[in-house]
Amino acid sequence: MIMRRHVSRVTFAAMAGVILILLVVQMLFVFLAQIGDLTTEYRIGSALYFVLLQIPTNLYAILPIGALIGAVVGLGSLASSSELVVMRASGVSVWRIVGWVLRPALIFGLLAFALSQWLIPPATQSSLAVRSGMTKDVGLHGYWHKEGEEFAFITYANEKGELGAVKAFQFDADQELLSSWQSPSGMYQDDGKQGSLIWMLNDVSNAHILPTGQSQAVHAKQQPWTVNLKPKLLSAATANPEDLSPSQLFKYVRLLSVDQTNVTNDYKLSFWQKTLAPLGLLSLVVLACAFVFGSLRNRSMGFRVVIALLVGLGFRYIQDFIGYVSLVAGGWIVLYVLLPIAVAFLLGAFALRRAR
C-alpha cells in the first residue's frame, strides 16, 4: 500500500510538472504569435484573453507527450535513488509497478476526454470570435451542396435555422453557367407544410448570364431558396469536426448517416480520436515504463527524456497520418485510430516482458 501510493504520487507529480512546463511554454509561443497581429481593434487585452481561451486546446494537445515524459522522469528519479531496485528485490513485479504508474496516467487520460467534451468546444468558439471579431462564422469549414444542377457553398448554419454566407452556381445540362447568386445571411422558414424546406435569404446579389455572354446583375432585398436541407443537418455539415465534442460528433454522425450525406468520415475520425484519447495516453505511459525498465535503463535521465519526446512526437504524427489514410481508404475508421495505440501497447509490453 505504501509503495503503491509512493510510486503513484511521484509519477503524478512528475507528469503534472512536465505538463505544466510544456503548457506555459506553448502559451508563451501563442502569445508571442499574437503580438505581431495587434491593431487598434485587437489590443493586448484581447490577445491575452485569446491566449487564456486557447489553454484547453493546447493542454489537450500536450497531455499525451507530457504524461509520457513525466512517467520517464518520475520512474527515472525512483530508479536513480535505487527505490525501484529495492521494490524489485522485495518481490514486486514490473507489471505491478507499471499498474501503479498507470493510475495517475488514467487521471490525465480522463482529463483529456473532459477537455474535449466540455471545455474545448465553447473555448474555441469564443477564442476565434475574439481573434477575428466575428460571432458566427468561426470554427467552421463550410459545406458544398449539390441539388439538381445547382452547386451551393454554405459557410454557416445552426440548429435554430440561422444561415451564414451562401454562394450558389446554376448550370445547364451541358455544364454551362446560367447564373450565380450570393447572400450574407438567411433564415429557415417553417411554413408547416411537409416536404417544404424554404430558406429566406437576405440582400441577395444575382448574376444572370445572357446568351451574348454578358452578365445581368439583379439585387433582391429578400429571396426564397428552396433546397432539401434541414437546419440540424446543415448545422452538422458546416461545423468543423475538430471543434466539436465527442457527444456532438456522435449525434452528427448519426444525423448525417441517416440523411446519406457523404461527409461523415471526418466526423467519425474526430469522434474516435477524441474518444480513444485516454487509451492513447496510457499506451505512451506503458512505453515510458519500458524505457526505464528496458534497454534504456542504464542510460542517463536526459537521454531517456529526449527519446521519450521523440517517441511522443512520432506517435502523434503517425496518428495524424493514419487518420488521413483512413479518410482516403475508407472502411472501419476506429481500426485506423486503434492501430498506433495497439502498436504502442505491444511494443511497451514486449520490452517490459524482456525486462522481467
Image: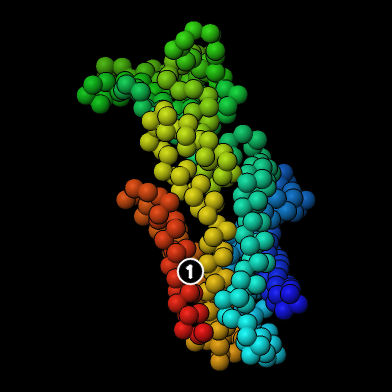
Q: Residue at x 53, y 35 (%)?
A: 251
Residue 297 occupies quadrant:
bottom right
How many marks overall? 1
Q: Residue at x 67, y 67 (%)?
A: 104
Q: Indicate the amino acid at tag 1.
A: Phe
Q: Where residue 298 appears, x then y in whole percent?
A: 56, 92
Which of the 4 quarters of the picture holds residue 175? top left
Residue furthest out toward the left: 174
Give the residue displayed 57% in from the left and 29% down from the top.
158
Check the picture and name the quadrant holding the N terminus.
Answer: bottom right
| Relative image position of residue 314 (x, y in whole percent) | 47, 69
- Residue under numbered circle 1: 345
Q: Is residue 256 left or right of residue 33?
A: left
Residue 25, how many percent across, how many down? 68, 68
Q: Is residue 213 above or below residue 329?
A: above
Work out whether 328 lies above or below 93: above
Which secondary structure lies at badge 1?
A: helix
Place residue 107 in its image quadrant.
Answer: bottom right
| Residue 292 seen by the camera | yes
User: Dot 1 surroundings within 10 Å: few (below 14), some, or many (20 or more)?
Assistant: some
Q: Nearer the viewer, residue 80 or 356?
A: 356
Q: Outermost residue, front direction?
A: 91
Q: In the rendered image, is residue 79 in sight?
A: no
Pick the front one: 184 or 302: 302
